[in-house]
Amino acid sequence: KQEVTQIPAALSVPEGENLVLNCSFTDSAIYNLQWFRQDPGKGLTSLLLIQSSQREQTSGRLNASLDKSSGRSTLYIAASQPGDSATYLCAPWSSSYKLIFGSGTRLLVRP
Amino acid sequence: EAGVTQSPTHLIKTRGQQATLRCSPISGHTSVYWYQQALGLGLQFLLWYDEGEERNRGNFPPRFSGRQFPNYSSELNVNALELEDSALYLCASSLGEGQSTDTQYFGPGTRLTVL
């Protein structure tokens, strides 16, 4: 059974800092892994998808890495901005064809 | 291109009633997924439909059910509502091709409140 852990649970940083969000999962038999952001009371916005055969994926100031064998993924946010404040969720997509979500990292970027 | 849409935005029901939530996938997507996000419990997988068939369901009682229509839109029904069913219900869609590049795109959600 896939279990997903995200560390830290919450993070508060001043604007401009680079930061790293961590995700670990127990079952390495995954199709891919997605990172999402969720604003309070809203749906999810897909940020990045890393295929199981990939090590890294980049979009703008975001970079996500995947180490499938060790069951880890990290999301790196460069030069953080107040608009980045949200909850960030990682979700490996397992062979049972469903996303399993971590509990998220709640990020606050202070101006 | 229109994203995933869900209706209604908010729904208020009383215990014992039935709730019906609707989802329209992105054009060209054949798979629809339902997730529940209850306070303090995180996002939980509910149901997956593809090509009109239920393909997988999460650990939820049978009073959670749904269907997918020929146009790939979907309906989630919750019977005999209980207070703990109060949650944000999110629908997602994907191409459903089973490829590692397949991405789930989420709608804005329906907030269900059970009084």
Image (cartoon, rainbow, N blue to C red):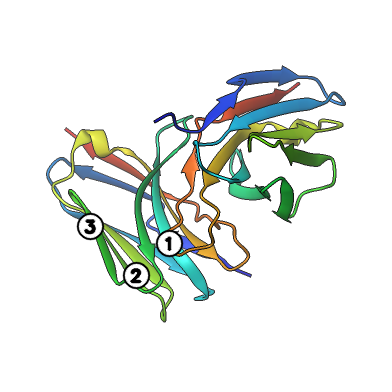
Q: Residues within 10 Å of mark 3 (few under 14, many from 20)?
A: some
| Circle 3: element type | strand
Quarter assignment of residue B109: top right
Residue at x-position 70% and y-position 18%: B12
Task: State the quadrant of the N terminus of chain A.
Answer: bottom right
> Badge 1 is on which residue?
A33
Given residues A6 and B102, the one toward you in this image is B102
Mark number, residue A58: 3
Q: Amino acid at mark 3?
A: Thr
Q: Amino acid at mark 2?
A: Leu
Q: Amino acid at mark 1?
A: Leu
**Dots 2, 1 in contact, CB < 8 A:** yes
Sequence-wise first label, 2 or 1: 1
Q: Mark 3 and mark 1: span between their CA atoms?
A: 13 Å
Given residues B24 and B61, the one toward you in this image is B24
Are the numbered discs 2 and 3 placed on the same chain, yes or no?
yes
